C-alpha cells in the first residue's frame, strides 16, 4: 500500500494539469502518517466538518503504474474534479484529503481515502442518505478507460464515516498493510 501525507491542500480544479509535472512518492514513516491523519481528521470532525471515506477499486496490477504519477493524477483529475464540480464555487478550495494506494489480495491496486469539507459542502455530496445522484453518475462513468485516462475504476464507495465507526477505525483500515503509497503535494 502506498500513502500520501497531505497538509491542508485544496482541490484546485481550475488548474487540472498542475499535478502532472512532477512525481513525488516520499518514503514516510508509516506510523507517522497514520497518527497525523487520525489527529487531523478527528479535529475536523470536532470542528463540525463533513468527513467522507472513499474507496476506488481498479484493475491496475502493475506496481510501476501504482507508484507512478498516473495514480495521483487520476485522484486529482478524475475523482476530485468530479467531487468539486458538485460544490458551490466558494467551497471548492475548502476540501482536504488524504489517501493511500494499496494492493489487494487479488493483486489489483485501489485507493482508500478521507475527504474533509465544510458541512454545507458535505450536504451537497450526501443527500437523503445517499451519494449525490450526479456525483454517483459521474463516478460510474469512470468504469471505462477514457481517451486520456490510463485505467478504470471498477467499483467505488463514497460515504460519511458510519456512526458505529470512528476516524481511527478507517485510518487503521487504510494503513492495515505495510505496502502502501501515501498522498502528498
Image (cartoon, grey):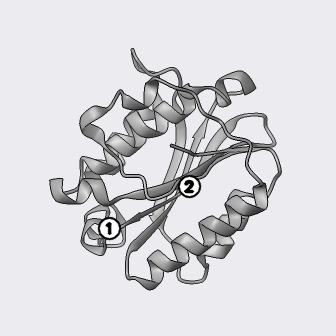
Q: In this view, does 7 lie above or below 148?
A: below
Residue 62 visible at all: no
Picture quadrant where residue 88 is located: bottom left
**Residue picked out by circle 1:** 122
Q: In which quarter of the image is the N terminus?
A: top right
Q: Which mark is residue 8?
A: none
Q: In this view, does 175 lie above or below 105?
A: below
Name the residue: 56% across, 45% down: 184
User: Which residue is more in the foreground, 96 or 143?
Assistant: 96
Separation (CA) of disc 2 from disc 1: 15 Å
x, y (%) of residue 121? 27, 66
Name the residue: 63% across, 66% down: 36
Name which of mark 2 and mark 1 comes first in the sequence: 2
Name the residue: 54% across, 78% down: 42
Picture quadrant where residue 8 is located: bottom left
x, y (%) of residue 18? 37, 30
x, y (%) of residue 95? 36, 58
Picture quadrant where residue 125 is located: bottom left
**Residue picked out by circle 2:** 113
Assess disc 1: are there few (<14), some (14-19) or many (≥20) residues with their C-alpha within 10 Å of its C-alpha: many
Q: Is residue 156 above or below residue 45?
A: above
Name the residue: 17% across, 58% down: 90
The answer to whether the residue labelled 2 contacts the one labelled 1, judged by CB atoms less than 8 Å apart, is no
User: Which residue is more in the foreground, 126 or 171?
Assistant: 171
SS category of the residue bearing label 1: helix
Residue 184 visible at all: yes
> Is residue 155 found left or right of 36 in the rendered image?
left
Assess disc 2: are there few (<14), some (14-19) or many (≥20) residues with their C-alpha within 10 Å of its C-alpha: many
Amino acid at each position: 500500500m502506498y500513502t500520501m501525507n497531505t497538509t491542508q491542500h485544496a482541490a484546485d480544479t481550475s488548474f487540472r494539469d498542475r499535478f502532472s509535472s512532477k512525481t513525488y512518492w516520499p518514503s514516510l514513516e508509516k506510523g507517522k502518517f497514520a497518527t497525523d491523519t487520525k489527529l487531523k481528521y478527528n479535529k475536523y470532525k470536532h470542528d463540525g466538518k463533513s468527513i467522507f471515506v472513499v474507496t476506488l477499486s481498479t484493475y491496475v496490477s502493475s506496481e510501476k503504474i501504482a507508484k507512478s504519477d498516473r495514480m495521483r493524477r487520476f485522484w486529482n483529475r478524475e475523482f476530485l474534479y468530479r467531487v468539486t464540480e458538485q460544490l458551490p464555487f466558494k467551497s471548492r478550495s475548502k476540501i482536504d484529503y488524504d489517501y493511500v494506494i494499496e494492493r489487494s489480495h487479488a493483486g489489483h491496486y485501489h485507493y482508500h481515502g478521507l475527504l474533509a469539507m465544510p458541512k454545507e459542502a458535505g450536504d451537497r455530496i450526501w443527500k437523503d442518505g445517499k451519494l449525490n445522484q450526479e456525483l454517483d453518475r459521474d463516478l460510474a462513468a469512470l468504469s471505462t478507460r477514457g481517451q486520456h485516462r490510463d485505467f478504470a475504476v471498477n467499483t467505488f464507495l463514497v460515504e460519511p464515516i458510519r456512526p458505529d465507526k470512528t476516524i481511527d477505525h478507517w485510518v487503521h483500515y487504510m494503513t492495515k498493510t505495510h505496502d502502501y503509497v501515501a498522498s502528498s503535494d
